[in-house]
Image (cartoon, coloured by chain):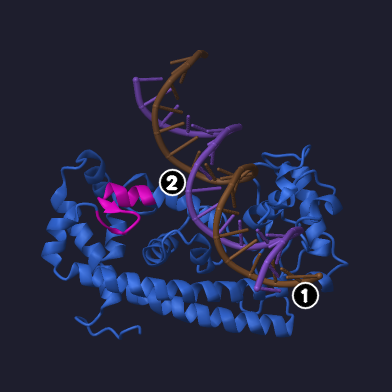
Chain colours: A blue, B brown, C purple
Amino acid sequence: MGRSPCCDKMGLKKGPWTSEEDQKLLAYIEEHGHGSWRSLPEKAGLHRCGKSCRLRWTNYLRPDIKRGKFNLQEEQTIIQLHALLGNRWSAIATHLPKRTDNEIKNYWNTHLKKRLVKMGIDPVTHKPKNETPLSSSLGGLSKNAATLSHMAQWESARLEAEARLARESKLLLYQTKVSSSSSSHHHLNITSSSSDHQQQHQLESPTSTVSFSEAKTEFVGSSSASTCLNMIKEAENDWISSTIHEFQGVEEGLTGLLLGGGDSLGRSFSADKNETAGETSGDCNNGYYEEDNKNYLDSIFSFVDPSPSDSTPLF
DNA sequence: AATGACGTCAACCGCAATGGA
DNA sequence: TTCCATTGCGGTTGACGTCAT
């Protein structure tokens, strides 16, 4: 299997994008769609490899991207989905529609992972690092863990299929719209009837300073494609909503854990005391963390096996 | 004010998956 | 079925900003 030679070509620019490059890429995609990424740079007059262009588009220039701080709901969703899916960033991103996989990955690595580690939870397994005392107190942990693992595999496969469908649908939708709006050079119209609200994103690149106030994203209808997307999105949202809802069934579980997580990211929480506890007590505050860990595990295992409560089983 | 440590995140690298010929 | 070009994905890097000393 040969590697793509595009990145090996000499003379291609690398590194941060300039506003001029952003404009060129944006203008080209608005008018023609991205088509083949490999041939795009030449056609768009960019001295970049196609891969670099694709990355810049998907991670930054795309109009349907929400930037800025993650809110509590998003943080919870990421942690919950990570517990299910592991480092499947693209699958996780599917359920945070306006966030890119790269952004989620970065956020996890720089914020959420550290928070879990600080609480003595293994960010890979989402289990306490020192499992022995806690697991014995919980009882049946290994059985539950196996169940969780099995379910995660099943869900993982399902999510992949869903993500693929959603991607294909979005692509179809976008291409349809681009071809029908070729007269507009500065207004990028993307249609999605699944979106209740029309949003105008004003994005400002930390690298370049291109303003997207002109790249108005207007969601107008392309009926068949949008209907298709709608259906997929509704099904997806139904599932993820019920899943997250189940997951959050033990309210003091993850939510409590997050609220009590307390590190520099406590910015979104009013958790001064917890921050103090987390940072000043170091690894000594075992009682505090054990309680958190138990809540955390409770939330996961309630999700896996809700039988003790009156929750409806998911499967 | 200087500088070193640390945190953040855009961008790159390279492998895997996919799809068309 | 096989080969190969292309795309997707996740891990990693490095530039830049901020904070601490």
Looking at the picture, tell me which residue is in the foreground, A14 or A66.
A14
Q: Position of residue A217 (x, y in %)?
A: 71, 65
Q: Position of residue A164 (x, y in %)?
A: 59, 72
Tag 2 subunit: A
Q: Quadrant of residue A310?
A: bottom left
Q: Tell me the quarter of the image containing the N terminus of chain A.
A: bottom right
Q: Which residues are magenta?
A: A113-128
Provide the secondary structure element on which disc 2 rests.
helix
A119 drawn magenta: yes
* In this view, A248 is above or below A48: below
Mark 2 residue type: Thr
SS at badge 1: helix
Q: In the rendered structure, which amino acid carries the disc numbered 1?
A: Thr
Q: Residue at x 61, y 78 (%)?
A: A194
Give the number of the disc on residue A176.
1
Q: Which residue is mark 2?
A: A110
User: Where, by quadrant of the figure, is residue A296 drawn?
Assistant: bottom left
Left or right of residue A79: residue A197: right
Label 2 crowd (10 A; few <14 / some 14-19 / many >=20): few
